[in-house]
Amino acid sequence: LVFGITGFLISMLAMFFWQLPILFMVLLLMGMGTTLTGLVIGYKTVTICGTLGALSSIGCLFYPGLNQILIFAPVFIFMMVIPGHVLNHAARKQKKS
C-alpha cells in the first residue's frame, strides 16, 4: 500500500509540478521494491542493497542529460544483480541440503 501510494505521488509530482528525470524515478521505485522484497523474504543483503539503491537514485538529480546513465548503471547492478546472485547461491545451497 505504501509503495503504491508513494509511486503514485511521485508520478503525479513528475507529471504536473516538477520535471523529474526518468532514471531517477526508475531507481527510486525499483529500490523501494527491492527493499520491500528483502523485508518480506528476510534477507538483509537484499534489503540493504535496495535501500542504498533508492538513496543513490538522488545522484541522478545532480547529473544532467545522458550523464545520468553513468549513475544508473552501477547503482542498478549493485541493487539488482548482486542480491540476485546472493539469492541464487542461497537457493542452490538449500537445494543441496
Image: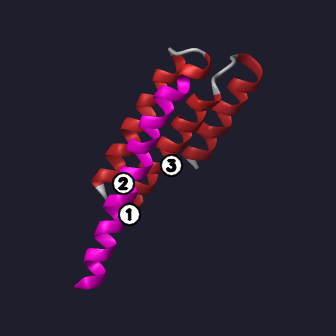
What amino acid is labelled 3 in the image? Gly
Of badges 2 and 1, the one in the foreground is 2
The label shown at residue 41 is 1
Query: Is 91 left or right of 15, judged from the image as shown?
Result: left
Find residue 85 and report its horizontal and vertical position in percent.
35, 59
Query: Is 25 left or right of 56, judged from the image as shown?
Result: right
Q: Which residues are the magenta region?
A: 68-97
Image height check: is 86 above or below 10? below
Find residue 48 and report its horizontal and vertical position in percent.
32, 44
Q: CA distance from mark 2 to mark 1?
A: 12 Å
Going from N to C along the chain, the mark reached first, 2 or 3, is: 3
Depth order, front residue of 87/47: 87
Q: CA distance from mark 2 to mark 3?
A: 13 Å
Please, what is the dominant secondary structure of the magenta stretch?
helix
Q: CA distance from mark 3 to mark 1?
A: 12 Å
Mark 1 crowdedness (10 Å alpha carbons): few <14, some 14-19, many ≥20: few
Residue highlighted by disc 2: 83
Residue highlighted by disc 3: 33
The quadrant in which residue 66 appears is top right
Q: Residue at x 31, y 75 (%)?
A: 92
